[in-house]
Amino acid sequence: MPSYDPNNIFAKILRGELPCYKVYEDDKALAFLDIMPRAPGHTLVLPKAPARNLLDVSASDLAHVMTVAQKVAKGAMAAFGADGITIQQFNEGAGGQVVFHLHVHVIPRKAGAAMKPPAAEKEKPDALAEQAKKLAAAIASG
Ligand code: 5GP
């Protein structure tokens, strides 16, 4: 497996070199909205420590990322009136991974509504800002 590339786009977001629509942060993880959401509120949860994917992440960082994914999922159910949550996580190109810093997708779902294809369309900045505000508040209120 190739080694971790610190110039990947999520590493730049983690270092504050690129912006994101943040919904949650603690000392070990960051969660922000996917700018090409497969459904409204689609969120990515990342460990802050460098890890390419599931295959090289430490067990404790992986456990923490999943704990944060659960917080985000519960917040999304409340914030977006979701009927369910889809979790996705891709490993290496053959596994569907495009950005090589481990991330877990948390995708709020409405009954009967299909997900858009991956990276189909960029969401409008205003919509992302509004969704991030709502979701961050729901996560903070537990
Ligand atoms: P994966 O590596 O899991 O296949 O997918 C990477 C995800 O990152 C895609 O869902 C894509 O829409 C999202 N993405 C790509 N570039 C950016 C970006 O600059 N900012 C954010 N927030 N998401 C991105």
Image (cartoon, grey):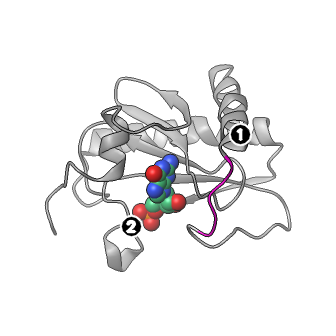
Measured in 3D between alpha carbons, the distance from the residue under mark 1 to the one under mark 2, in whole angstroms, is 25 Å
- Residue 100 in the image: x percent, y percent? 31, 59
Label 1: state its secondary structure: helix
For the record, the magenta segment spans: 120-124
Question: Quadrant location of residue 16?
Answer: top left
Label 2 residue near ligand 1, CB within 8 Å: yes
Q: Amino acid at mark 2?
A: Val
Label 1 residue near ligand 1, CB within 8 Å: no
Question: Quadrant location of residue 75?
Answer: top right
Q: Compare marks 1 and 2 and give the one earlier in the sequence.
A: 2
Q: Amino acid at mark 1?
A: Asp
Residue at the outermost top position: 141
- Residue 102 in the image: x percent, y percent? 35, 53
Residue 2 falls inside the magenta stretch: no
Q: Which residue is mark 1?
A: 126
Residue at left offset 21%, top offset 55%:
56
Residue at left offset 25%, top offset 61%:
55
Total numbered labels placed on residues in the image? 2
- Residue 4 in the image: x percent, y percent? 18, 55
Residue 98 disc label: 2
Q: Image height check: is 24 above or below 114?
A: above
